Structure formats: C-alpha cells, structure tokens
Image: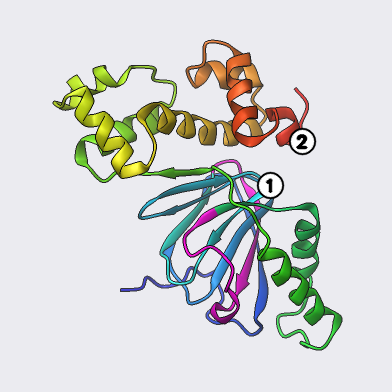
Amino acid sequence: MSRPLPPSAPARLVRPIQVQVIDMPPDHHVAAHRHDWGQLAYASEGVLSVTTATGTWTVPPQRAVWVPPGIEHAVATRSGAAFRSLYVEAELIDGLPAECAVVAVPPLLRELIVAAARLPRGYDRQSPGGRLAAVILDQLRGLEPVPLHLPMPADPRLARIAAALAEDPGDNRPLGDWAAAVGASERTLARAFTRETGLGFGAWRQRLRLMASLDRLMAGEPVTTVALGLGYATPSAFTAMFRKTLGAPPSVYLGRRD
C-alpha cells in the first residue's frame, strides 16, 4: 500500500519536468513515500541521504540520487540541505537507471536545475522554460553512477552487525570478533555479506565509513578528526581511500579548505 506523499511533494506533475524547492534544516527527515514519477534528489548545499528497503544512498552537492517511479524512499539530512528535487514524468525516463543510483551531477546540470527552480509550475512548453526542461532531460540521460550506495543485509545476524557499525563506524573489530558475537562462523558471515550486499565485509565497512564522513566533513569537522573518529590509523590512510573511491581528496571533492 502506498504511503501518503509528504506535504512538500506535489500531488501530481503539471509539467513533464518540475523542480520542487525545499530548504531543509539540520536533522530534517521526509517520511517514506512513493510517487508515480521519477525523482532526482539533489542538494545545491548540504548532504542528503535517501533510504529504501534495499539500502541507503548518501550524496554531497556534486552528486544526486536518482529514484525511479514507484520506489518507496525516505529523505534525510544531518547537516541541513538546500534540497532541489527534480521530478520527471514516467513516460520520459527511458535511458535512466531502473534502480536507485547515485549519479554525478555536472556543473551544467547543476545550473539548469537552479534555473528550473525559478520557473512557474505551469510554464509554457513552447517557451524558453520548456526548452530548458528539454535540455535537462538530455543531461539526465548522460549521468554516470558513482559508488555511494550502502546495500543493507537482510540476514538477522548481518543486520545486527550493520546496525552496530552504523552507530559506531569507527569500530575496528575484525569479522571474527563479530562472528563470535552473533553466534556464527567467520566464513559463514563472510559469504553471507558478499551474497546479500555484493561487497565483502571490509569493503562494506569502508563504504559505510565513506558515507559517514560526508556529513561530518560538510559540517566543518577537520579531516584529521573525521579520519581518526572513523577508525583510520592516520588521516593519510583515510584521504587515500577517499581519493581512490571518489577521484579527489576531501578538500577538493567538497570544495572546502582545511
């Protein structure tokens, strides 16, 4: 059964491409809901998290989450966010991912979304606004996924471990210790993690830490504090992981100076 749309979401689209502007305060949550159109969840400022039944996607301003029609999802921000939700009619989403995905948002698309947010809801399709919407659609079809998805395991033993690590991403206990805690063999848990998430335990924990770091860095915490708090032996080890995964060190990726 579909949950009701949150008050901030439109009951229907009046145009094929529509932008909803929501300035979210820190620790803001939009309850789980679904709609009949596609959504690009993008924040021009701040970090967003989008959660579905299969996992969580976390994105800084240079990224967005694509949510196909019909998928129940919740949206949240720890740091606060200038949320710009781009809605796309289901008939126009050919060529876009069939599942939720984090995508890189190039500078041109970022500016187009900001411009579209200023359009009236019922803009003339033959006007410059209509042509702007057509360019946005072309840009959407060229987006590339990036690894900011944290798949969540369903196995109760793995779910227990995942929940504990989500509470304390800096917990460095090896899988063998976790196996003893949940009453399973290390080999069994290792296989189950790979089967249910597509990632080995170490890779899953590293993805969790990467996503946890984004909110902390955007909130202004120094790289050293974030790195040590997430269980890395040195800031350089954290920076190397960040650069390898996202293509740039934290200061460059997030456009900040430490």
Left-right relation of 29 to 175: right
Q: Which residue is mark 2?
A: 255
Helix, strand or loop at mark 2: loop
Q: Residues within 10 Å of mark 1 (few under 14, many from 20)?
A: many
Q: Which residue is mark 1?
A: 61
Q: Are marks 2 and 1 in contact (CB under 8 Å)?
A: yes
Q: Could you tell me which residue is drawn at 27 percent across and 39 percent down?
A: 159
Report x, y in % for residue 40: 60, 62
Residue ranking furthest to the right: 128
- Which image quarter is the N terminus in? bottom left
- Which image quarter is the C terminus in? top right
Report x, y in % for residue 28: 53, 50
Residue ranking furthest to the left: 183
The answer to if 94 sits in the magenta stretch is yes
Depth check: 3 or 63 in front?
A: 63
Q: Could you tell me which residue is drawn at 29 percent across and 21 percent down?
A: 175
Depth check: 48 or 130 in front?
A: 130
Tell me which segment is drawn in magenta.
78-101
- Per the model, the C-alpha gap separating discs 2 and 1 is 10 Å
Q: Earlier in the sequence, mark 2 or mark 1?
A: 1
**Amino acid type, residue under disc 1 in the picture:** Pro
Q: Residues within 10 Å of mark 2 (few under 14, many from 20)?
A: few
Left-right relation of 175 to 218: left
The answer to if 197 sits in the magenta stretch is no
Q: Could you tell me which residue is drawn at 63 percent across and 22 percent down?
A: 239
